[in-house]
Image (cartoon, rainbow, N blue to C red):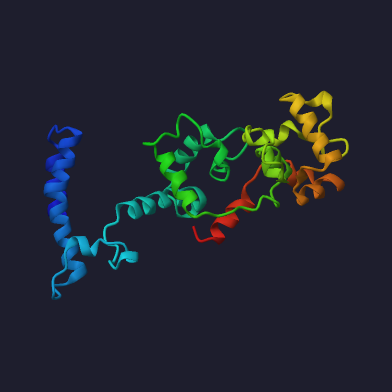
Amino acid sequence: MSKHDKQVKLYSSRHLSLRGRATVTNTLIMTKIWSIIYDYVWQNKRPLVSYSQLSLPLSLGGIGLLQPTAQHLVLQIRHLHHLFRPNNSPPLVRPHFKYHMNLITPSPMPPEMSFFVPEWHTHPLNHPTSIVNACYHAFDHFGIKFDFSRCSVATLLQLPLHYLLISYPADHWLHRHIKFLASNFFTYDPLLRRLRLQVETEYTQKPTLCRKLKKEILELRTVQLQPYLFDHVVADVDEDLQLVPNIITLVNQLQHNHL
């Protein structure tokens, strides 16, 4: 491999176009690397098996050798480890990655929070060729349905409002405003030390729709709140714990699913 590394460096010294580098990779570099991989995997067994057979997915009878999509996914999962398993991260990688995520995640939430809230993925930094986009896809690959019930009040208020509801009609306006924050409808009252619905004079965003939603919850009962919200509504809130945004419970769920 050291011999091939020298050849790659030699090719890199030439001023080739992107297409030229791709041609060199396919015709010169990959053929030599493939020869090494083939010898390792097949070990001169008979009969000989073609590359196309070795690279077939497991579901089609192959052994799934050299699957670019799977290898790309594994690479992005390594980046996720830098965020969610900091003890295993190089000292310079995690701060650099968190800085970029902080540009996407709304303040005051921790920068990693946008991974748990897909509604926040729309951002100029998240484009098809960005590392952020690849990491979002890798994270979503696990298909984990996160439980937000143990999040702090400060975290809940920064979530999209529909996260705090069990169900609402199919034609409800919240389907058209999926980024509408819970803090536009709920508030923490420091005098009562409890979470409560805002009153009409406190509405700053979409007041007409908020008034309608309040009626749907309290009178018509066509919209239901998540049951865990009542723990913060009927009992005093521990301000030291509940007024600080955190994602510890979400990260624990992620690690429990073996990220």
Placement of 199 over or under 143, stated as above or below? above
Image-quadrant location for residue 209: top right
Q: Quadrant location of the N terminus?
A: bottom left
Q: Going 75% across and 33% down the picture, which residue do you hit?
A: 185
Residue 212, position as x, y percentages in the image? 79, 31
Direction from residue 76 to residue 66 in the image, left or right: left
Which is nearer the eye, 35 or 84? 35
Residue 197 seen by the camera: no
Which is nearer the eye, 8 or 223? 223
Residue 232, position as x, y percentages in the image? 80, 46
Residue reaching furthest to the bottom = 46
Image-quadrant location for residue 14: top left
Direction from residue 98 to residue 148 in the image, left or right: right
Residue 162, position as x, y percentages in the image? 68, 40
Direction from residue 165 to residue 1 in the image, left or right: left
Q: Going 51% across and 37% down the picture, which residue do you hit?
A: 121
Q: Tell me how many marks there are.
A: 0
Placement of 245 over or under 42, stated as above or below? above
Residue reaching furthest to the front = 171
Direction from residue 142 to residue 25 in the image, left or right: left
Residue 179, position as x, y percentages in the image? 62, 34
Residue 234 seen by the camera: yes
Q: Going 50% across and 53% down the picture, which residue do you hit?
A: 85
